[in-house]
């Protein structure tokens, strides 16, 4: 596999809520331009890991480097500048229903830049075009389908020009055709925009379609039990990992 420059490095990360440890001393890296998937069963810590990677929570131990800078140690303007390097699309889109798609995309530009309105509208329109919604700028979220609603959420996450895009369950709840179209969109954006994608997912068809590499978290061990390409994980020496990819029930 082609070696890539690391854009995210996680070193000895531990995370806990109150007295309950969720993740214990995990380490991994993500290459620049990679589509990297975080997977695992319910309660394994996928969401917890994501929240730490995007700076919502501070770990109980360990370090997170974004583009070579320590997110955990960063404060003030340095931290804000570092967080500008990432964008996030949440599972249900989190679009503002009272705003058009164009207004939803313009909002972060109004909040975080000094660009004039014409420039904001142009950037928002371009990003809607990138996700196949060039004809929908004046539609409200309720006026487009649920599957299509994830597209402007991705566009809004991209609008400030991040280097890394985090996607939470982008294919969840979609029919097979719409899910495949979402997979194609992610791959096209990764290729054309040169961004790094970090995807939290449990949708096996999508994982196998988009992932350059993946890590599998485990609730019992509170850590990473396997990493590699989807093909490598599907043929893992660890029965639990093989069962996950074969969608088989069982223990041991």
Image (tube, grey):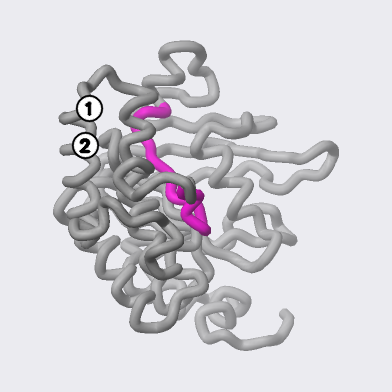
Say if 236 sits above or below 106 in the image: below
Indicate the position of residue 155 as horizontal and vertical percent values.
31, 49
Indicate the position of residue 102 as horizontal and vertical percent values.
30, 45
Mark 2 nearby-residue class (10 Å; few <14, some 14–19, many ≥20): some
Say if 133 sits above or below 177 in the image: above
- For the point 60% across and 79% down, the residue is 239
Say if 139 sits above or below 107 in the image: below
Q: Which image quadrant for residue 250?
A: bottom right
Indicate whether residue 86 is drawn in magenta.
yes
Q: Label 1: state its secondary structure.
A: helix
Determine which of the numbered discs, if any, sits on residue 128 in the image.
none
Would you say residue 162 is visible in this rendering? no
In the picture of the structure, the residue carrying the numbered disc 1 is 117
Name the dominant secondary structure of the magenta segment: loop
Q: Is residue 56 left or right of residue 16?
A: left
Determine which of the numbered discs, if any, sits on residue 121 in the image.
2
Identify the magenta region.
83-95
């Amino acid at each position: 596999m082609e070696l890539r420059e690391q854009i995210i490095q996680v070193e000895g990360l531990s995370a806990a809520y109150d007295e309950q440890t969720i993740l214990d001393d995990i380490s991994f890296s993500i290459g620049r331009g990679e589509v990297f998937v975080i997977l695992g069963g319910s309660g394994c810590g996928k969401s917890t890991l994501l929240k730490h990677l995007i700076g919502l929570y501070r770990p109980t131990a360990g370090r997170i480097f974004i583009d070579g800078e320590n997110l955990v140690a960063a404060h003030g303007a340095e931290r804000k500048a570092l967080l500008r390097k990432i964008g996030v699309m949440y599972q249900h889109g989190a679009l503002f229903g009272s705003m058009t798609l164009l207004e939803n995309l313009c909002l972060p530009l109004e909040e975080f830049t000094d660009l004039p309105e014409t420039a904001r509208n142009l950037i928002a329109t371009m990003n809607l075009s990138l996700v196949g919604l060039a004809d929908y700028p004046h539609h409200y979220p309720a006026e487009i389908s649920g599957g299509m609603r994830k597209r402007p959420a991705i566009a809004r996450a991209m609008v400030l020009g991040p280097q890394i895009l985090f996607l939470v369950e982008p294919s969840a709840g979609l029919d097979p055709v719409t899910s495949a179209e979402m997979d194609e969109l992610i791959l096209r954006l990764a290729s054309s925009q040169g961004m790094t994608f970090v995807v939290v997912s449990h949708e096996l068809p999508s994982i196998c379609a988009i992932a350059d590499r993946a890590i599998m978290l485990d609730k019992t061990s509170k850590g990473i039990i396997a990493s590699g390409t989807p093909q490598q994980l599907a043929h893992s020496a660890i029965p639990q990992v093989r069962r996950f990819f074969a969608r088989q029930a069982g223990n041991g």
